[in-house]
Image (cartoon, rainbow, N blue to C red):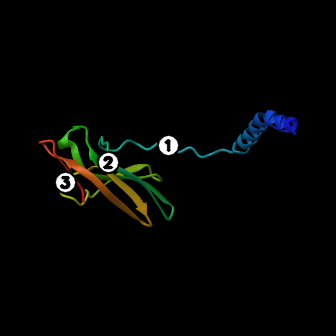
Amino acid sequence: MFDDILMYMKALPFLLVLFLLIACAENTEEQEVKTPPSPLPVATTNGAVTAFESEGMQQVYVFGGLGKEKDYKGITRRSFRYDLEDGRWAELPPLPDTLGKIAAAASQIGDKLYIAGGYHVFADGHERSSN
């Protein structure tokens, strides 16, 4: 019995490679290659980013973040939408807050986008988190 088990264990690597080759051969059909998105209209980092899909529309949203200034003055309320179909960015109304936000989160739930959390940094270095 031990010899039978040993025989199967020796064959296992061969079988794994065979299964991988079969799986790769089945996935050789041509796939559409999309053009990568153009950069945001303004340099931004640490914003809330999420994808949105509804009724065939596919979009990417960016809310708030930190601009090229990379200090408290660069924290923004600006928001953008990228449409994957036409490959263009559109600026949206700013975040509905009195201060810009960094490190927030965004997510699609149903047919709505929600933005939560984040914080603002002030000139003296103190921070205020969103409620």
Dot placed on the residue nearer the N-terminal end, 2 or 1:
1
Residue 81 to residue 31: above or below: below
Q: Residue furthest left?
A: 124
Please tell me in which quadrant of the rendered image residue 109 appears.
Answer: bottom left
At horizontal 70% and vertical 42% (from top left) the residue drawn is 28
Asked whether the beta carbons under mark 2 and mark 1 sit within 8 Å of each other, the answer is no
Count of residue discs: 3
Q: CA distance from mark 2 to mark 1?
A: 23 Å
Classed neighbour count for the residue bearing mark 3: other residues with Cα under 10 Å, few (<14), some (14–19), many (≥20): some
Q: Amino acid at mark 3?
A: Leu
Asked whether the beta carbons under mark 3 and mark 2 sit within 8 Å of each other, the answer is no
Q: Which residue is mark 1?
A: 35
Classed neighbour count for the residue bearing mark 2: other residues with Cα under 10 Å, few (<14), some (14–19), many (≥20): many
At horizontal 46% and vertical 52% (from top left) the residue drawn is 84
- Between 18 and 5, the residue placed more toward the observer is 5
Q: Which residue is mark 2?
A: 47
Q: CA distance from mark 1 to mark 3?
A: 35 Å
Measured as percent of width and height from the top left, residue 101 is found at 25, 51
At horizontal 20% and vertical 39% (from top left) the residue drawn is 71
Dot placed on the residue nearer the N-terminal end, 1 or 3:
1
Q: CA distance from mark 3 to mark 2?
A: 13 Å
- Residue 32 visible (yes or no): yes
